[in-house]
Image: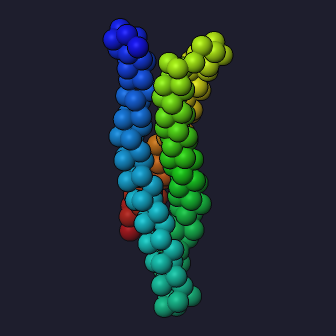
């Protein structure tokens, strides 16, 4: 194999390899966010349980109602981040498969194999884009949830 051919193969492999690295950085943030939402939900469920168990019928009713209003939204956000994480993992798999196909293409004369390099790469990019879009949707929901809590708490304290 000529050095120029080998250099071309390495250059072709670098594009999906760089995207694998980018996905890994994105996954670190997503998994941290996923864990934070998970812990917040567990804390709220525990707090609700403690309020229900130890409170008189009127004690903590407003706080329980606030938790009951927030938990479905938090669960929806958790589901969206879960889908985003899984989607980015799928993109990583596609980019790694693309690297393997590039390597196989070097030893093969099959034209369909060369076309599959491009197709696999493009599908990986589309899947990654979907993961980012899901994440953006979750961030919008998170903003609305925080806005709801601030407005709710502000109006409750204003009445006092």
Q: Which of 75 and 104 is in front in this view?
A: 104
Image position of 105 with respect to 3: above or below: below
Check the image and report above or below for 123 versus 41.
above
Q: Which residue lies furthest to the front in this view?
A: 1
Give the quarter of the figure containing the N terminus.
top left
The quadrant in which the C terminus is found is: bottom left
Q: How is the image coloured?
A: rainbow
Q: Residue 3: horizontal and vertical position, in percent?
A: 33, 11
How far across and down, in percent of the image, does residue 110 sit? 63, 15
Q: Is residue 139 visible?
A: yes
User: Quick check: 24 above or below 55?
Assistant: above
Total marks drawn?
0
Instruction: From the viewer's perspective, tell me whether residue 26 is left or right of residue 74.
Output: left
Which residue occupies the foreground of this view, 38 or 108?
Answer: 108
Query: Residue at the spot x=54%, y=33% of the render?
Result: 97
- Residue 139 at x, y percent in the picture: 46, 43
Q: Is residue 76 above or below residue 50?
A: above
Q: What residue do we see at 48% from left, 78% from top?
A: 46
Q: Which residue is drawn at 42% across and 23% down?
A: 13
Left or right of 104, for residue 40:
left
Residue in front for this viewpoint, 146 or 34: 34
The image quadrant of residue 90 is: top right
The residue lying toward the viewer, choosing from 18 and 4, is 4
Q: Position of residue 10 (x, y in %)?
A: 37, 20
Residue placed farthest to the right in the image? 112
> Residue at 46% of width from left, 77% of height from top?
47
Is residue 129 in view from this perspective?
A: no
Residue 117 located left or right of residue 11 = right
Residue 18: quarter of image: top left
């Amino acid at each position: 194999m000529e050095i120029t051919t080998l250099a071309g193969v390495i250059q072709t492999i670098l594009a999906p390899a760089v995207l694998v690295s980018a996905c890994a950085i994105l996954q670190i943030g997503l998994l941290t966010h996923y864990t934070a939402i998970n812990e917040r939900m567990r804390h709220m469920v525990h707090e609700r349980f403690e309020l229900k168990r130890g409170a008189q019928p009127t004690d903590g009713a407003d706080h329980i109602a606030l938790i009951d209003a927030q938990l479905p939204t938090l669960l929806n956000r958790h589901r969206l981040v879960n889908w985003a994480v899984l989607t980015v993992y799928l993109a990583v798999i596609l980019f790694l498969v693309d690297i393997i196909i590039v390597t196989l293409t070097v030893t093969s004369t099959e034209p369909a194999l060369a076309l599959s390099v491009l197709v696999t790469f493009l599908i990986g990019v589309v899947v990654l884009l979907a993961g980012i879009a899901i994440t953006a949707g979750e961030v919008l929901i998170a903003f609305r949830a925080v806005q709801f809590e601030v407005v709710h708490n502000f109006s409750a304290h204003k009445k006092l």
